[in-house]
Amino acid sequence: MGKKFLVCGGDLRQVEVAKMLSGYGYSVGAYGFSQDVNIKPSVKIFDELNEALDFADIIILPLPCSADNKNVNMPMTNKKLSFAYLFKQIKDEKIVVAGNVSSEIADFAQQSNVYILDYYNREELKILNAIPTVEGAIQIAMEETAHTIHSSKCMVTGYGRIGKLLSHSLKSLGADVTVSARTLADLAWIKANGYTAVQTSHIDSLIYSQDVIFNTVPTVIFDKKTLGRVSKDSLIIDLASKPGGVDLDAASQLGIRTIWALSLPGKVAPLTAGRIITDTIINIMKELGV
């Protein structure tokens, strides 16, 4: 385990990444955290970026790695670090792994000849990340409604990773579950699993009777026309990444309660989410032979 890791910026998930890697026996440094952050004594805290980069062979940036495509996401410190500056300081053959790398950030890396990998693209991470997302979504539904999930009419739009796990969890709690999908194969699986199936383009026909609607489709399918069919007593929980699946302005105008629940793993289960990221990064390193 001769390679040294630098955990750079991020939230409690990154703190857990540093702790886990250190626990696995790796040499680990951290940059972009305030002094009161509780990281293992075996993790070396750096105040100076150049010292931190000299220490590291592999640099781990957070998920998401940026909120503005210009600066590293570092919510646990008042420091700022631009990608343009960071990548110019990276020398030798170091590897950068980051979560949710935009085309703009990839361009910064390419201009500085920095090798960057996006661990958020890994299927194992996305599947396992769906678990805390589902738990967080159900928690929101429980907190924001005056009725039980049991016997509630719940609609899940989209039957991808999150949609599959969410539908199963809702049914196990006794909900009456309707699931939408686009493909005939997914619709068949939805029926086989005992849910009510509906084409995503035809949700208007069933949407008026739902108590809670969970959207997982990352394109706007809840436009003003569709939202006009939603009961004022319903709650919409949008789990989709940007741009989301709900026209929030239209929902507000129509008085439809909508919660856009982004980045739930880091909010509801940062330790679990950090462990998922750590194991994914180790998988990547093994595949690279590092």
Image (cartoon, grey):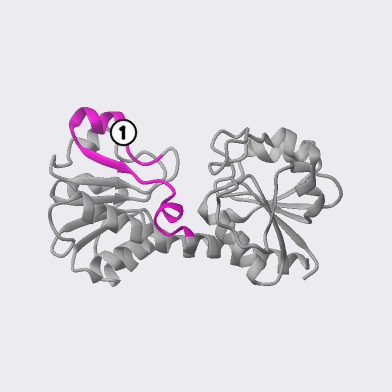
Give the residue drawn at x 28%, y 52%: 140
Residue 228 higher or lower than 165, as above or below:
above
Residue 62 higher or lower than 135, as above or below:
above
Judging depth in this view, the residue of 103 and 273 nearest the camera is: 273
Give the SS element for disc 1.
helix
Quarter holding the N terminus? bottom right
Query: Is 6 within the magenta?
Result: no
- Which amino acid, mark 1? Leu
* Residue 156 x %, y %: 29, 55
* Residue 258 x %, y %: 26, 40
Q: Which residue is mark 1?
A: 248
Query: Is 266 within the magenta?
Result: yes
Give the residue drawn at x 53%, y 60%: 274
Tell whether 156 sits left or right of 35.
Answer: left
Give the residue drawn at x 64%, y 62%: 41
Give the residue drawn at x 78%, y 66%: 290
Check the image and name the residue furthest to the right: 92
Residue 49 image-quadrant placement = top right
Judging depth in this view, the residue of 15 and 59 nearest the camera is: 15
* Residue 5 x %, y %: 72, 58
Highlighted range, magenta: 244-270
